[in-house]
Structures are given as structure tokens and as C-alpha cells.
Image (tube, rainbow, N blue to C red):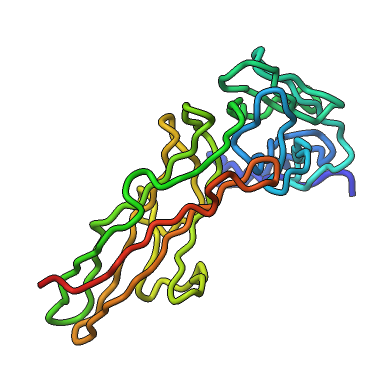
């Protein structure tokens, strides 16, 4: 079947009869192109964009026809709009040496252009550490009834390159309790949340090289918690862990006096 009925528009005439217009589209005609997000938000100056394992990451885009189905055989090219990076071998992003900035890339197929993707060109980061004290205390108030949530504590880390800081570095967080890493779905008592208040275990450093999460502690009436947990932050570059990774902040959880 080479054509797909896309819509059936029916017009009511003055006489009361109904006339229908059969609107069809060619399913093989390119109707949309999606530039797939890269695994990492940044590429080290003078290097190729790499995934979290350190393997060179191929730029990818998906092309769709008029019927919404993927067209896997349509050739796709990638274009940079600035001087921070170039495209090698058709689908590899290579950052220029000695520069720092935002590389803007888009995909092209059949005359259609995708939305622009931004990839930061950064100096090679070399370390991660707590942004402040390596220990903290949560002093929560036990609810008289039901449950209560304490979100007064923010845990931050900083990524550096020599004496400077590095933005757009991917950092993964985890909570360790009693020597065991809590699973992503284990939010019964503790969870790490982002700015929108949603559980989030991955983020990127900001312009000051800082990345942070709010620790949420859930308590239940009648149950007193005295605990010690560790928030860990992992960061890699080219598949290798940064110095200090995983960075740790130890938090003592006690009831308020």
C-alpha cells in the first residue's frame, strides 16, 4: 500500500447532503526529522564526543514519513553552525582544540532540518569534590500524625579542571545506607530531588561547576529515625572516573530536640 488515508474531511452542504473529501499523503515523503539527544551534554576540547563509557558517540537522527512510520534508509547529514566543533566522517562531533563554548548542531534529511542541539565544548575536568563541608546533619521534627517530609538539606558537589571549574559535566548521584546503595525506586525514607521536586539521580554542572540535589527525608508518626547515610556523586570523562570520584557527603539524621 503506497498511500495512506490521512484524513476524511466532510462538509455539510446547504441542501443537507454531505460531501466528503479524501485527503491522502505519500507515506514515503519525509515529514519530520528528530535529532536524538546525545548521551553526554559536553565534549572535551580537542576530542570527539563520547558516551559515558568513553566510546566515540555517533550522532543519530530518526526520519519519519507521511504516515508517521520511520524511514530508516533515508540518508542524514549533520551540520555545525559555529567554529567550536566540526563533523568528521559524517556523524562524529569533534571539538576544536583550545576553545570553549557552545557547539550548535542540526540534522538534515530530504531538505528538512531538525531542531538545533547544543553541546558544550569544555576543558578536560580532572576532579570532583563536595562543594562545602563533607558532613552535615538533618534535624527533623517527628509528626504527631501521618507523615512529614524534611527537605531542608541540599547536598552539592563541584567539578574542577586545574584551578578552574567546568560546566556541563554529567554527574550521577546515589544514596548509601548501611553500606548498601538504595535503588532508584526506594524512596520510602530518603530520596534526592531536583529543582522541580521530582526524584532525580542525574544532572549536569552549572556555570560555576556546581551540581546539587535536595535530600528529602520522610518520617512517620511514632517512628523515630536515628541514622547515618552517605550521598555519593560519580563523574567520569572518557570513561575514566575523575579524581575524588565518587565524592561523598555524610549526613547524620536525628530528631529535633
User: In this image, 73 relative to 181: left or right?
Assistant: right
User: In this image, 254 relative to 195: left or right?
Assistant: left
Image coords of residue 246 (percent x, y) = 53, 54
Residue at point 19%, 66% (across, down): 139
Residue nearest the viewer, comparing 96 with 106: 96
Assign the C terminus to one quadrant of the image. bottom left
Looking at the picture, does residue 201 appear above or below residue 21?
A: below
* Outermost residue toward the bottom in this view: 222
Toward which corner of the image does residue 100 lie, by quadrant? top right
Image coords of residue 23 (percent x, y) = 72, 39
Looking at the picture, does residue 138 appear above or below residue 1?
A: below
User: In this image, 158 relative to 92: left or right?
Assistant: left
Looking at the picture, does residue 55 appear above or below residue 251?
A: above
* Outermost residue toward the left in this view: 257
User: In this image, 125 relative to 176: left or right?
Assistant: right
Residue at point 89%, 39% (across, down): 73
Residue nearest the viewer, comparing 67 with 7: 67
Image coords of residue 101 (percent x, y) = 56, 20
Toward which corner of the image does residue 143 lie, by quadrant? bottom left
Looking at the picture, does residue 229 appear above or below residue 164?
A: below
Residue at point 41%, 71% (across, down): 187
Residue nearest the viewer, comparing 230 with 205: 230
Image coords of residue 192 (percent x, y) = 40, 59
Amino acid at each position: 500500500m503506497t498511500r495512506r488515508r490521512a484524513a476524511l474531511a466532510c462538509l455539510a452542504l446547504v441542501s443537507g447532503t454531505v460531501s466528503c473529501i479524501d485527503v491522502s499523503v505519500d507515506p514515503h515523503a519525509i515529514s519530520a526529522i528528530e535529532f536524538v539527544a546525545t548521551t553526554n551534554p559536553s565534549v572535551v576540547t580537542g576530542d570527539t564526543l563520547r558516551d559515558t563509557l568513553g566510546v566515540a558517540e555517533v550522532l543519530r537522527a530518526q526520519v519519519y514519513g507521511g504516515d508517521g512510520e520511520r524511514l530508516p534508509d533515508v540518508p542524514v547529514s549533520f551540520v555545525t553552525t559555529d567554529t567550536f566543533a566540526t563533523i568528521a566522517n559524517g556523524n562524529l562531533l569533534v571539538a576544536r582544540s583550545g576553545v570553549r563554548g557552545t557547539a550548535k548542531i542540526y540534522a538534515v534529511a530530504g531538505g528538512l532540518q531538525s531542531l538545533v542541539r547544543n553541546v558544550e565544548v569544555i576543558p578536560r575536568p580532572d576532579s570532583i569534590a563536595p562543594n562545602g563541608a563533607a558532613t552535615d546533619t538533618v534535624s527533623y521534627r517527628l509528626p504527631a500524625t501521618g507523615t512529614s517530609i524534611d527537605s531542608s538539606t541540599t547536598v552539592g558537589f563541584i567539578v574542577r579542571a586545574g584551578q578552574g571549574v567546568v560546566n556541563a559535566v554529567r554527574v550521577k548521584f546515589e544514596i548509601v545506607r548501611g553500606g548498601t546503595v538504595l535503588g532508584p525506586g526506594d524512596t520510602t525514607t530518603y530520596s534526592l530531588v531536583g529543582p522541580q521536586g521530582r526524584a532525580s539521580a542525574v544532572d549536569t554542572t552549572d556555570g560555576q561547576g556546581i551540581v546539587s540535589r535536595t535530600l528529602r527525608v520522610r518520617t512517620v508518626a511514632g517512628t523515630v529515625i536515628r541514622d547515618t547515610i552517605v550521598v555519593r556523586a560519580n563523574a567520569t570523562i572518557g570513561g575514566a572516573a575523575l579524581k575524588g570520584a565518587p565524592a561523598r557527603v555524610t549526613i547524620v539524621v536525628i530528631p529535633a530536640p
